[in-house]
Amino acid sequence: MSMFGGIDASASGLTAERLRMDVISNNIANVNTTRTANGEPFRRGVVVFEPRTEEKSAFANFLSGELLEGAKKKDNRKPGKGVRATKIIHDDSPGKMVYDPGHPDANAQGYVELPNVNIVNEMVDMITASRAYEANATAIQSAKSMANAAINISK
């Protein structure tokens, strides 16, 4: 990995975690949305990540320890190239049913289906996304410091 490879991998992590925080914020903002454009309650969104790979010997192979065809054992252990968000899926689990016969979205029995968003889970997810973002920012700062130290060696 080049000197800038670590910065690139961490930058991809920053981008992915920012998207994750945006989706979590949207979930929290819609915690009381009982009707969307399709007439159903809001459904919680979840970001799906996967490793960025340009070749077969990236992060997934590093973790699994698989040996590539024609590669030496030491050549197989290459660092990853970062992460990317592949899609945002919607959680189809049912929402909580609340008795509120006066609500415009109540069914014939008087129950309203609320979104399947749990504020506590969303806040925990937000904290983990924030910590991952901070860790990637720290890794970039460390790489910059090492590059500056390497430049200053020759002075």
Image: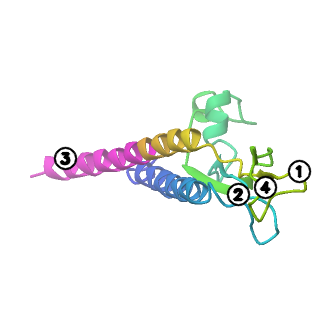
- Residue 113's spot in the image, x, y percent? 78, 51
Hey, which residue is sitting farthest front in the picture? 102
> Are discs 4 and 3 less than 8 Å apart at CB?
no
Mark-to-mark CA distance, 2 and 4? 37 Å
Residue under the image location 45 percent in, 50 percent down: 10
- Residue 116's spot in the image, x, y percent? 71, 47
Reading the image, the residue beneath label 1 is 109
SS class, disc 3:
helix
Closer-to-camera residue (119/98): 98
Q: Amino acid at mark 2?
A: Lys
SS class, disc 2:
strand
Reading the image, the residue beneath label 2 is 87
- Above or below, 124 relative to 91: above
Q: Magenta stretch containing residue 149, yes or no?
A: yes
Mark-to-mark CA distance, 3 and 1? 70 Å
Q: Earlier in the sequence, mark 4 or mark 1?
A: 4
Say which of marks 3 and 1 sits in front.
1
SS class, disc 4:
loop
Disc 1: CA contacts within 10 A as few (<14), some (14-19) or many (>=20): few
Residue under the image location 86 percent in, 56 percent down: 107
- In the rendered structure, the answer to whether residue 119 lies left or right of residue 96 reads left
- Above or below, 97 relative to 20: above
Residue under the image location 62 percent in, 30 percent down: 63
Q: Earlier in the sequence, mark 3 or mark 1?
A: 1
Specify the label residue 101 is tagged with: 4
Disc 4: CA contacts within 10 A as few (<14), some (14-19) or many (>=20): some
Closer-to-camera residue (19/148): 19
